[in-house]
Amino acid sequence: KTYTVAVVGATGAVGEAMLSILAERKFPVGTLHALASERSAGEKVAFGSQKLVVQDLATFDPAGVDIALFSAGGSVSKEYAPRFAAAGAVVIDNSSAFRYDDDVPLVVAEVNPEQVANRPRGIIANPNCSTMQMLVALAPIHRAAGIERINVATYQSVSGAGRTAMEELGRQTAAMLNFQPHEPAKFPVQIAFNLIPQIDEFMDNGYTREEMKLVWETRKILGDDAIQVNPTAVRVPVFFGHSEAVHLETRRKLTAGEARELLEAAPGVEVVDEREPGGYPTPVTHAAGADPVYVGRIREDLSHPRGLDLWIVADNIRKGAALNAVQVAELVVKARS
Ligand code: A2P
């Protein structure tokens, strides 16, 4: 059996990766519709060895679509995802539009795959990239020892902010190296050779929305509202791959060796922890273009009797977005056959 699949936002950084991952993993695609705004309708995008002509979402008829992968921003999802679902499609939405709705499951393929079946609205939400990679690594630790509290600082690449953000880092870097003027546009301040401790808007409590996503989504995905999460989210001048310094406190003490064993057995995780120069994952040496969530620097927290420290790195466009969406689509299809 094959399926009619639509990718909404097919010209974007995540949409492009969705197309290549569907082809790579040989998803049973019969027909694939590449959709974007009227700005790019008529352009071509790659799907395996094929070239697909991009169609305008606004005039597209969703009848007959079995699975729709959305990554065109929250407002597009709010408007069009319910229409695709009403036409019979299962929508897998990468935006934050539906993530916190009780009747929309929020699924990390390795953590709570059983939740794909609970989709009364025909919509399944894909988590935020930072939460995604953190929980692939932390879920097995939570199951084994119970996580009470997570302190996390993120180091997030510009691809998470889309294609225009990557262009801004490239252009700004080149301009600076050539002593040319450069103005920030997508980012609030210069991103080249800099760090920005703000991702998404500020909330009343002083955290940013990106930081609160780590709080809300961790609790929803692990199904445990008692977990305390204290995040700081930082944008860094890296193109692909988010990194996270995670300090966690468990109910039951876990040694670093026990944590390492759990992580080595965890689906989707690769441990890279040699305790020598280069013996740890980085966005450039490990994560960019790769599927696993890499974990290194596993050690016991000097300052807390039940504390553990981890360094978690993954490709935010792949596991953090497109790959998980395709894995969720695979779970939907598996349940049907
Ligand atoms: P387009 O190329 O037509 O602007 P990114 O996150 O990398 O910036 O990508 C955003 C994706 O969402 C692009 O594919 C973009 O298409 C698509 N998109 C943005 N706004 C709309 C819209 N109003 N309708 C359909 N697609 C949209």
Image (cartoon, rainbow, N blue to C red):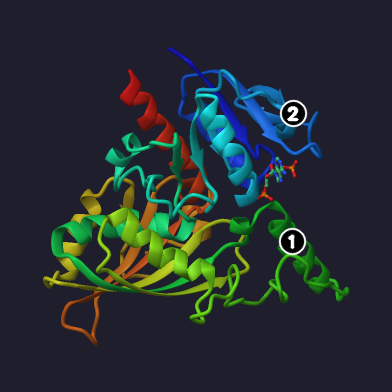
- Check disc 2 and report its element: helix, strand or loop: helix
Q: Is residue 250 above or below residue 108?
A: below
- Check disc 1 and report its element: helix, strand or loop: helix
- In-image side of 45 versus 285 (left or right): right
Q: Which residue is mark 1?
A: 170
Residue 272 visible from this viewpoint: no
Q: Which residue is mark 2?
A: 59
Q: Amino acid type of disc 1?
A: Gly
Name which quarter of the figure residue 58 lies in.
top right
Front residue (pair 172, 80) = 80
- Place of residue 321 in the rendered image (x, y in percent of width and height, measured from the top left): 50, 47
Query: Which residue is depicted at the point 69% across and 52% down?
Result: 163
Give the mark nearest the N terminus, 1 or 2: 2
Front residue (pair 53, 245) = 53
Query: Which residue is depicted at the point 67% across and 75% down?
Result: 193
Front residue (pair 177, 95) = 95
Q: Nearer the viewer, mark 1 or mark 2?
A: 2
Q: Quadrant of the N terminus?
A: top left
Q: Quadrant of the C terminus?
A: top left
Q: Label 2 neighbourhood size at 10 Å, few (<14), some (14-19), many (20+)?
A: few
Q: CA distance from mark 1 to mark 2?
A: 34 Å
Q: Label 1 neighbourhood size at 10 Å, few (<14), some (14-19), many (20+)?
A: some
